[in-house]
C-alpha cells in the first residue's frame, strides 16, 4: 500500500496481485473544520413560536430549539438563570459562553431595562455571524428592539460598550478557554455552547472547573442540556446540580450552583 498527500486529500493505493489498482481519496479534516465557514452553510428556520433560528446542515444542529427559539432562551437563561441570580440585587455580572445569534444578550438587555438592574454582560464567541446572516434574524422586530439588536452585533469586539443606562456589553472573539476572565466575579453563566455531540471539547471537566472558578460563591450556571453525563461532570467539577423542567419540546434543563 502506498499513500501520499495532494491538495488537502490523503490518497492511498492498494496493489493486490492479479487485481487492478484502486485509488481512494479521503478528506483530511482539521479539528476546527467542524464550524469553519459556517455562514456559507447556515439556513434560517422559523421555530414554533415564530422566532427564527439558524440550522447547520453539516452537523444537523440548530442554534436554538425548533420548538421556540425565543421561548427556550427565556425559559432557560432568563427565567431560570437571570431572574434567580438577580434576587433583589442592584447589579449583576453575566458570562455567556456562545454569543451566537445574540438572542440571549438581547433578552438580558431588555430584562435589565425592565427591572432597572445594572448588568455587565460578557460574551464569548469563536465564530461570529456575518452581518448578512444577522439581518435574517427577527428577534429585534418581535421584541420591538431592532436598533438595540443590531447594536449588539455591530459593536466592536474586545471592548466594553455601554448600550444604555443599565446594560454594558463586552464581546470576546475567540475560544472561551483562552479568554482572560477574572475568577470569582460572575453571578451567572449562560452556558449555550453547541450540544456535546457537536462540540465535545466544551463539555469536559476542565471546562466546568474553569467556569466554577469564574463564578462568585453561590453563583449559578444554566444550560439547556440535561444529559446524565454532563450533570455528572458538573458534580465532579464541584457544582451542586438541579434538574429543572425544560422548555417546550424538552423534558429537563440543568442549573448548577457554586457552593457559598
Image (spheres, rainbow, N blue to C red):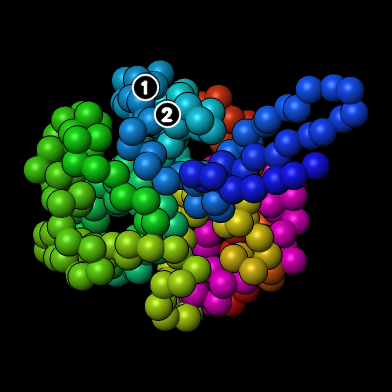
At mark 1, the secondary structure is strand
Name the image quarter holding residue 74: top left
* Residue located at (45% from left, 31% from top): 56
Mark toward the start of the polypeptide (2 vs 1)? 1
In this rendering, position of residue 156 left or right of residue 69: left
Whether 155 is drawn above or below 29: the answer is below
In this rendering, position of residue 89 left or right of residue 112: right
* Residue located at (50% from left, 52% from top): 32
Q: Quadrant of the C terminus?
A: bottom right
Q: Which residues are magenta?
A: 209-236
Can you give x and y, in whole percent of width and height, for residue 230 in the image?
69, 51
Taking depth in this image into account, of 8 and 113 the one nearest to the observer is: 8
Instruction: Tell whether label 1 touches label 2 (CB within 8 Å).
Output: yes
Q: Quadrant of the N terminus?
A: top right
Can you give x and y, in whole percent of width and height, for residue 73 in the image?
41, 40
In this rendering, position of residue 34 left or right of residue 100: right
What residue is shown with label 1?
Answer: 45
- Spatial CA distance of label 2 from label 1 is 7 Å
Whether 100 is drawn above or below 133: the answer is below
* Residue located at (49% from left, 44% from top): 7
Number of marks: 2
* Residue located at (25% from left, 69% from top): 158
Q: Assess whether residue 219 is covered by the magenta stretch.
A: yes
Q: Residues within 10 Å of mark 1 (few under 14, many from 20)?
A: some
Residue 27 in sight here: yes
Can you give x and y, in whole percent of width and height, for residue 11 in the image?
65, 40
Q: Assess whether residue 216 is covered by the magenta stretch.
A: yes
What residue is shown with label 2?
Answer: 55
Q: Residues within 10 Å of mark 2 (few under 14, many from 20)?
A: some
Amino acid at each position: 500500500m502506498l499513500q501520499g498527500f495532494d491538495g488537502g486529500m490523503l490518497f492511498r493505493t492498494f496493489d493486490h496481485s492479479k487485481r487492478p489498482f484502486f485509488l481512494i481519496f479521503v478528506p483530511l479534516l482539521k479539528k476546527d473544520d467542524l464550524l469553519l465557514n459556517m455562514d456559507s452553510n447556515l439556513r434560517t428556520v422559523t421555530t414554533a413560536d415564530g422566532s427564527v433560528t439558524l440550522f447547520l446542515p453539516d452537523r444537523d444542529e440548530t442554534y436554538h430549539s425548533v420548538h421556540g427559539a425565543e421561548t427556550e432562551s427565556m425559559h432557560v437563561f432568563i427565567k431560570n438563570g437571570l431572574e434567580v441570580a438577580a434576587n433583589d440585587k442592584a447589579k449583576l455580572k453575566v458570562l455567556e459562553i456562545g454569543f451566537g445569534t445574540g438572542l440571549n444578550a438581547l433578552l438580558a438587555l431588555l430584562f435589565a431595562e425592565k427591572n432597572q438592574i445594572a448588568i455587565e454582560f460578557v460574551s464569548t464567541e469563536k465564530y461570529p455571524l456575518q452581518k448578512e446572516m444577522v439581518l435574517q434574524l427577527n428577534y429585534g422586530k418581535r421584541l420591538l428592539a431592532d436598533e438595540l439588536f443590531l447594536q449588539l452585533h455591530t459593536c466592536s469586539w474586545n471592548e466594553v460598550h455601554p448600550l444604555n443606562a443599565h446594560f454594558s456589553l463586552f464581546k470576546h472573539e475567540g475560544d472561551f478557554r483562552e479568554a482572560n476572565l477574572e475568577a470569582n466575579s460572575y453571578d451567572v453563566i449562560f452556558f449555550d455552547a453547541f450540544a456535546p455531540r457537536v462540540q465535545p471539547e466544551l463539555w469536559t471537566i476542565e471546562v466546568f472547573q474553569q467556569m466554577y472558578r469564574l463564578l462568585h460563591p453561590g453563583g449559578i450556571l444554566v444550560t439547556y442540556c440535561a444529559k446524565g453525563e454532563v450533570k455528572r461532570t458538573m458534580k465532579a467539577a464541584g457544582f451542586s446540580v438541579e434538574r429543572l423542567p425544560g422548555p417546550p419540546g424538552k423534558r429537563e434543563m440543568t442549573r448548577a450552583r457554586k457552593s457559598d
